[in-house]
Amino acid sequence: MANSDPPLLSVRELTVTFDAFTAVDRVSFDLHEGQTLAVVGESGSGKSVTALSIMRLVELGTRGRITGGEILFRLPDGAVIDLIQQSESVMRDMRGNNISMIFQEPLTSLNPVYTVGNQVAEAVMLHQGLDRAEAMDRALEVFELVRIPEARQRLGEYPHQLSGGMRQRVMIAMALSCDPTVLIADEPTTALDVTIQAQILGLMRELQNETNAAVIIITHDMGVVAEVADDVVVMNQSRVVEQGSVYDIFERPAEPYTRALLASVPQLGSMAGRDEPARFDLVGEA
Amino acid sequence: MTDVMMPDQQELVPAGRDAWRMFLRNRAAVAGLIMFFGILFMTFFGPMLYDEDPNDIVARPFLEPGTEGAPAMGTDYLGRDVLAGVINGGSTTLTVAAIAAVMIVAIGVTIGALAGFYGGTVDTVLMRFTEFFQVLPALLFAMVVVTLFEPSARTISIAIGLVLWPSLARLTRAEFLRLRNLEFVKAARAIGSTDLRIISRVIFPNALPPLIVSTTLVMGAAILFEAGLAFLGLGDPNTLSWGLMIGLNRGNFLNAWWTVTFPGLAIFITVLSFSLIGDGLQDAFNPKLRGR
Amino acid sequence: MTGVDTTPSTPASGAEDRTPLVVVDDLCKVFPVADRAKIHAVEHVSLQVDRGETLAVVGESGCGKSTLAHLIIRLLDPTGGRIVLDGADITDLSARAMRPHRQKMQIVFQDPFASLDPRRTVGRAVGEPLRVHKVASGNELEERVANLFERVGLERQHARQFPHQFSGGQRQRICIARALALEPELVIADEAVSALDVSIQAQVINLMMDLQAEMGLSYLFISHDLAVVERISHRVAVMYLGQIVELGPRSAIFENPQHSYTKRLLEAVPIADPRRRHHRPLLTDEIPSPRWGPGEAPERVELAEVEPGHFVGVEAPTG
Amino acid sequence: MRTAAAKIAQSLGLILAVIVLNFSLIHLAPGDPAVVIAGESGAASPETLAQVRADYGLDKPFVTQLGIYVGQVARGDLGESFFFGRSVTSLIADRLWPTVLLVGTALIFAIVLGVMAGTFTARRPESPASHAVTVLALIGYSMPVFWTGILLVILFASVLKILPISGMHDVEFDGGLLASWLDVARHLVLPALTLGVIYLAQYSRLSRASMLEVLQSDYIRTARAKGLAEKVVVYKHALRNAVIPVVTIAGLQFGALLSGALLVETVFNWPGLGRLAFDSILRRDTPVLLGVLLMAAVMVVVANLLTDLLYRVIDPRIRVGARRTRTKVST
């Protein structure tokens, strides 16, 4: 974390509650331009709620309430605002425009009754004030950016006509359509097959080089973390356990939880040269 | 693997006792239960407490309630006591509805369960059969059955049973289809449980909550149906019923509102009690759907 | 046998009986779907599971691995081929005739939340196989259930609770206990650890290995996760579009993969080590569907033995 | 296209089955239609009865009669009324339009208002309006339709005196086409309201539940993440998905709607098929009864076909099949 620039996004002491349950407890981290930050944790660690809170989506459609902390965001003109303090209408202008998000299930995340082209163009029309035809041109552009084959034809297709990998590409295209400075990807490859996952991860890395967007990737998969992240935030039971560069976390984990987590990750190639299957060497197992 | 799911949102399927407690916490449902028992009490004990014969002419016709010498709910076009009619008119309706409901549940659940569990050709054939009964215009068909044969309580029950079972069959089928593919049902098959055991011990108990809810609503529908037939004059001509009372006084309701209002209110309260109970049960069985 | 003989040259160690526990020969399953199309879910699959070994079947969605598991345990009826369990041909047995054979093989499913009847205590669920097969009743049944709970790392008083009172990992342990109730020889694990968090997954895998060592179990381990498969298996079969494209000892598959699909699959696995990052070409392939139109049928993959026990699908030379 | 043809073939099969059932039922029932017919013409000597039987083909074996009837129906001939001595087809043609008008108006009223109320309250699930919808839905569902009708007449026609009590036209009405339409519309209000109110109750409740569920779905979260205003999220992205179950139920309930129409027609003296059926039952006018039963089945079948069509308009998943992806993998 040797970045001296002011951060693009700075989450400070963020706390989110669901009724009496604290889903996110005083979570802090920074995100810089061009950086890929992985937030990793198991079920119930609070990682997805953290992501939804940055978008202020946790208050829409869930019972979650942000009860403390700051989310400081640097606008393209250099001004820094606290997202938590912004009105819903300011947030609407930012969502899909300055900060955008993709989700785990590409099938259910796309509206089944509209064509994918329409769904991408909708965001462009909203944020960039383009008319329908121009927005469709932009949709085609981003479809090509995410390497969707026969992009023009796909614009007019419905989500159910596409494969899982193509749907996730559409989601990424939609997210990138307004050139956001921050992209939040919530388990973007969890629902995909491994060969498709590899393609999507490769694509995301390539796109980051091309667009220089900062990326927050929420995942439970240490393999994905190792593959794409510059820096890592490890979460457990609503709190940040440890954060650092990807090399620090994988090679010099400081906290027992991180060590235990890493010990239980099966690593391809770790069994080379052994004939019999082998148990995991788990910390604290009888 | 999303972690948005909070512990309290996890699939909690309340067992019988929990559901009962949730039900009792639902004020509307309890009101429904009280209304239902009130109607039952009136129907079966009312005649002992208020022993006016509903067929006797007790006063001048069309005495408005509250006027000199009028019974509590006034008199009808022949001068019969409307209150006596309301008290005595429920037993046919309730009996017919109960018999019809038993028939509906028996046919609907059996057909739906077989179609949903076995799928394939069995499903196709049974569903065509069900569709056929859904295409029949229910009331018209029941009217034909009742007039062509004899308009007795038994015929009427059978006619209602015959036309109202398809929706329950569809619901049962949908539940069985859904449950059949769940892994605990597959596990039961992998263990070697017989089909009968899987249907009766594994799938059926899990399909029961929506079926119970549906059955209460079916009771309401059967009551409305019986009342409709009686209103048209196609009920059992020998017994008094709420629907018949409204039908008989239909020509005079503009100058004698009470002759139709009170029997109608009795039907309405009875059906409403079932609706409220059904609604409460739905909430109790499925806390996630609360407030819908 | 119509299929290729895929007998391993070196049987797994620790087994006295050298006849294979399960022999699957030329198994096929075709599902008719709309528009007279057909899904060729499993095509000419031949394999065997030896006593005490773990045979993993890996592949991506739609490759037919779960269908294969369902066929072997006779939850589905095959379109063609044979299944021989412990010397007995069970391919065409009726549900009733199948029952005694079910004691020898059991299955654990993927979703620990859907695998247990929410309205029954978990003790009843675990005891159910014993009741169905009338193996035990009364106090003896209760005692056996309690032992099973202890065996999978739970406490005996847990038996009185309902599924929703347990975590995903605990539920999967309960499902394993249920599968073990009849003391089967084969346990089919159909993505049994895929839905679990990684730390829980490791514990359950360890439990499965311990049980194998104690009871001499064989596993047919269906999974999409190659890293897990590498950990747990003796032998591995790679499935693609309903067919086996490569089958062999674990070390052969992971250290010396021959088929292009196996290589692709292994290449794709993200490795939990930032110093071993892949540099991936930007591909946009899609996983092909096993659905075939009228008159179409998949081309049969022939297996060739490249080294003892290592079979590889013969591919047309590519340019 | 092939599925459409299959659907129509299947519907014709259903209708044929309905004809056979109705015909069998009526002919197996006790009672002699010849007596009814002869009774109408005054005398009932054995010779007359035999003559009547021969005239109406009632002396032929049952299966032959059935065959003849099915053949007639296929040619659009439903026979002749015992009572009116007119062709059943023309009788039904006269009565069809009022019933379609009544049922159609009630259905549209119930769906449009119901979906609006459901959508509105789903956005504020804890508001008083939302609870009111729940309560009103329960009440609406529980009222016997003929009783609702009577109460509405007492209120609007008798107390407030703003709407006609019954019938479809004013007796001494005389005027142009537009005025005649307005006259019918005035008469239509109460019957349509009576019939519609039950379904309004159900559809508002159903669309509220459906909307609540849709609003929890992932694509709604995506729409919000795009920065769309809540109005657009609800009315563009959620509504179209939320009406799908309402359309399903409306299609399934069409038969019940016709039953309700029968009662409403009786209460309001609305000159529709329901009245015709009711009168034919009392008169034992078998050909008319068979005709009306058939017509009702046809209406249900047509309604179901229309529902399917509507489905295809709303939901592209039904309209367009999934792309087949079976490309060879490049290695």
Image (tube, rainbow, N blue to C red):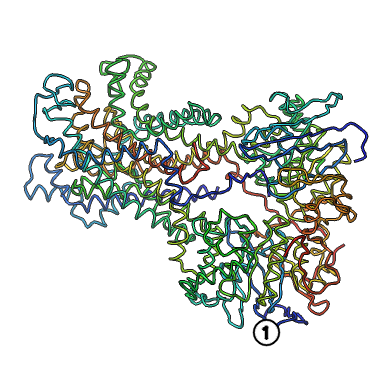
Query: Could you say whether the residue bearing mark 1 is in a helix, strand or loop?
Result: loop
Give the chain letter at badge 1: C
Q: Which residue is at the front of the view, D261 or C138?
A: C138
Classify C60 as above or below A175: below
Give me the residue at 16% from left, 49% from top: D31
Classify A235 as above or below B125: above
Tell me residue B87's x, y (percent): 19, 36
Relative placement, left or right, of D224 versus A217 is left
Q: Quadrant of residue A106?
A: top right
Q: Quadrant of residue C223?
A: bottom right
Tell me residue D94's x, y (percent): 31, 32
Q: Which residue is mark 1?
A: C19
Tell me residue D47's x, y (percent): 8, 50
Q: Amino acid at mark 1?
A: Thr
The answer to whether one can see residue C197 in this image is yes
Q: Which residue is at the front of the view, B14 or A157?
A: B14
Q: Which residue is at the front of the view, D140 or D288?
A: D140
Give me the residue at 47% from left, 75% from top: C134
Q: Quadrant of residue D100?
A: top left
Q: How many labels were placed on the picture?
A: 1
Quarter of the image with the C terminus of chain A is: bottom right
Q: Which class describes the residues within 10 Å of circle 1: few (<14), some (14-19), or many (20+)?
A: some
Classify C126 as above or below D264: below
The answer to whether one can see residue D77 in this image is no
Q: Which residue is at the front of the view, C206 or A213?
A: C206
Quarter of the image with the N terminus of chain A is: top right
Give me the residue at 86% from left, 71% from top: A273
Relative placement, left or right, of D122 versus C54 is left
Tell me residue A90's x, y (percent): 73, 24
